[in-house]
Amino acid sequence: MRIVAALGGNALLRRGEQPDAAVQQHHVHEAARSLAELVFAGHELVITHGNGPQVGLLAQESAADPDLTVPYPLDVLGAQTQGMIGTLLVRELVQRLPGRAVTALITHTEVDPHDPAFQRPDKFVGPRLTEHRARMLELERGWTCARDGAHLRRVVPSPRPTAILEVPAIRALLAAGTVVIAAGGGGVPVTRDHDTGRMRGVEAVVDKDSTAVLLAEQLDADALLILTDVTHVFTRFGSAHPGAITETTPEQLRALQLPAGSMRPKAEAAAAFSEHTGGLAAIGPLDDALGTILGTTGTTVRRGPGPKALPSGPSALGPVHRAEAG
């Protein structure tokens, strides 16, 4: 089975954690164990990942660097996060998959330069900000900030991906038996001149989940896994008695009232892949990718009858975690 596994950016750097390299290395170490189990089970694997916390941090550092005339643009910073997270994943996976080739590929995602998303920034990036700090950054740097729960964060344009330019290279690597890490952070956003083919970077961050769907479709993947820091999609999330959904359909998943900045994009991605391809989509915990594909944990999304839910209540579900974003 060919699997595209999408890791949330906050699954590698969680809310409130210090953005130190050691913290992210720890989470990547745990993620690699889970991902390696898919390869040991005989599956072809393409890994993609979010970068919201990481690209926002780099943007903040770049804007504050006195040696720069202007900050680095978001497309270049997105490429930096692909390299940073990619190398951490490669190192861990090579250790766990001796003799298996593992490659991280800088990947470009084409977007429409006229996408209305450029006029409506809504993609959260970077760390949480106080009200005072957010307003200062808006005045000094022209940023747009919006409320993410109890805090403010920077928001940037997130245009819809229309093509992933390195798909032929990814196919060739898969044919050679390589585990591929690609399209990190939604891919480096670019537009292309229709006459010359020249690529130009754009000031945006493409949504990782939307790119994961496109990547899985263009690679003819059998399954799309969206791995995050919760065990299931929940009904009544955050209440005293949430319900964990084990199986559902695209239509029923879309009908749920899910948080716009966290679980809703993941649900939409899973629903879209299931609808477009008839393949398996699943949302599950980062530490149990194999269980998610087998249906022993996580929420499975298929066309057809559903949903099924676990018994609600703390005794049945264990601790409830906050959904991640990015």
Image (cartoon, rainbow, N blue to C red):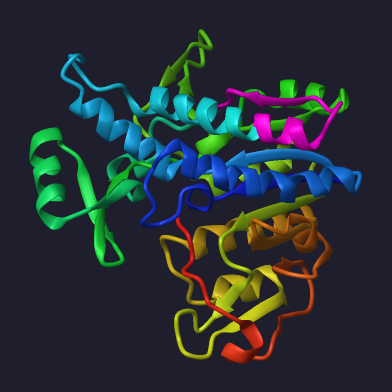
Is residue 85 visible to the viewer in this orientation of the structure?
Answer: yes
Residue extending furthest toward the right: 42
State the residue in front, 35 or 298: 35
Q: Which image quadrant for residue 301?
A: bottom right
Up/down of 245 relative to 205, above or below: below
Q: Is residue 232 left or right of residue 114?
A: right
Compare residues 73 and 306 and report the one nearer the observer. 73
Identity of the residue furthest to the top in this view: 196
Residue 213 can be seen in this image: no
Residue 87 against residue 303 in the figure, above or below: above
For residue 97: magenta? yes
Q: Is residue 84 left or right of residue 16?
A: right
Quadrant in the rendering for residue 125: top left
Range of residues picked out in magenta = 90-108
Q: Position of residue 8 (x, y in %)?
A: 54, 50
Left or right: 319, with 280 as reference point: left
Q: Residue at x 77, y 67 (%)?
A: 303
121 lies above or below 255: above
Residue 212 is left or right of residue 38, and the answer is left
**Residue 149 at x, y = what percent?**
31, 66
Q: Nearer the viewer, residue 164 or 65?
A: 65
Can you give x and y, in whole percent of width and height, for residue 97 in the image?
81, 35
Q: Residue at x 57, y 77 (%)?
A: 234
Residue drawn at 24 percent across, 22 percent down: 71
Query: Total marks drawn?
Result: 0
The x, y position of residue 260, in whole percent, is: 42, 64
